[in-house]
Image (cartoon, rainbow, N blue to C red):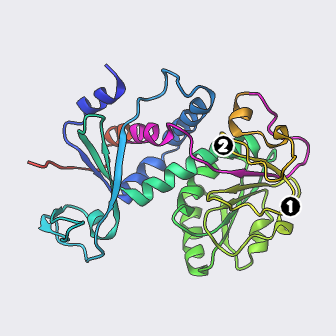
Amino acid sequence: MDSTRSLRRDIAVPLILTRRDLHVIFEDPVFLEEAFQTVHDLLVDPGSDRLPAGISTRPSWSAPTVPAAPSGQPCGSGEDSPNHVCRTSLFAAQRAEFLVTADGSLLAVAAAEAFDSWRAVTPSGLAARYLAPAGARSLGLYGTGTRAWASLCVFPLALPSLSLIRIYGRDLTTARELASSAVRHTGLVVTAEESPRVVAGADVVVLVGNERPLDPTWLGKGALLISQFADGVPAVLQCRRIGTTRSTSGKSGESELSHATLADIVCGRAVARRGGETISYQAEEIPGWPSALDMCALRRAWQLDVGQRFRLD
């Protein structure tokens, strides 16, 4: 029996997974380590039998921006959002994602934005383990967008040597709120900074939002710069550029060997670091990763008894 069929058998009724439910799952260090291992296995052997069989994720649906209705009351109407019953505030003003099996059986309805954040950030945690300078002590979080909290959970676990996190964002109040929550979650020293230059001087710098452009001269020698969005790495930055599964060579005539991929490094086909070089890593989608993570997250939800069960009859 394949893992998708087994999961469908285990899930007698589908789940609603809110943003908070997903945080409970992904903030679990044991689960994150399992997720890192899944990323590793996908990079080493995408066709491995050890990988969980994927489930399909139906296009997310945006609920109308209306006040949350009391549980069990109709919420939302219109051609693109038919009347339905609000069982949690998930459906009040957020995108919902439908996780289904290949034959269309519904497994879960999840908060799409939160799920997207964890899917995007988690592989970069494994990248940091391979690419960060030895004994990296400081993390600079450049941005306070939707992927910021996932980053504050993933990178300290990926890099146990970290002792200091600095956060910069356009909204200093939001940065301070993130810092306060991160202190409680990580036990590290976490500060919100008004100066982006201070944050960019960390050993590992993560771009999680489209904030003001990062000046390449702010980066310290030997730093690791991780971009969570396309074209985040400054084109003029003199560094070794690494992609996930394809080369990110930025200049014509440059050697492909100087721009290895994370897959090359994980498989031992290329070295992770050479001396005190500065490295930039461009996060990209890994084939098979979204569906594999969805499967693992659903299993974990049932193991932890997280989420709300519901029926359509």
Q: CA distance from mark 2 to mark 1?
A: 23 Å
The furthest residue to the right: 275
Q: Is residue 116 above or below residue 260?
A: below
- Check disc 2: other Cα within 10 Å, few if <14, some if 14-19, many if 20+: many
The image shows residue 5 at horizontal and vertical percentages of 29, 27
Residue under the point 78% across and 48% down: 249
Instruction: Tell me if 217 is positioned left or right of 287 in this view.
Output: right
The residue singled out by tag 1 in the image is 220
Image quadrant in which you'd find residue 176 = bottom right
**Dot label at residue 244:** 2
Instruction: Look at the numbered disc 2 and give the secondary structure of its residue.
Output: loop
Does the magenta segment cover residue 173? Answer: no
- Residue at image location 65% in from the left, 73% down from the top: 211
Pick the residue in front: 158 or 7. 7
Q: Quadrant of residue 202?
A: bottom right
What amino acid is labelled 1 in the image? Answer: Gly
Tag on residue 312?
A: none
Q: Position of residue 96 (x, y in %)?
A: 32, 58
Tell me if residue 64 comes above or below residue 275 in the rendering: below
Could you say which quadrant of the image residue 199 lies in?
A: bottom right
Quadrant holding the N terminus? top left
Q: Earlier in the sequence, mark 2 or mark 1?
A: 1
In magenta, the rendered stretch is 268-297
Which amino acid type is marked by label 2?
Thr
Is 284 magenta? The answer is yes
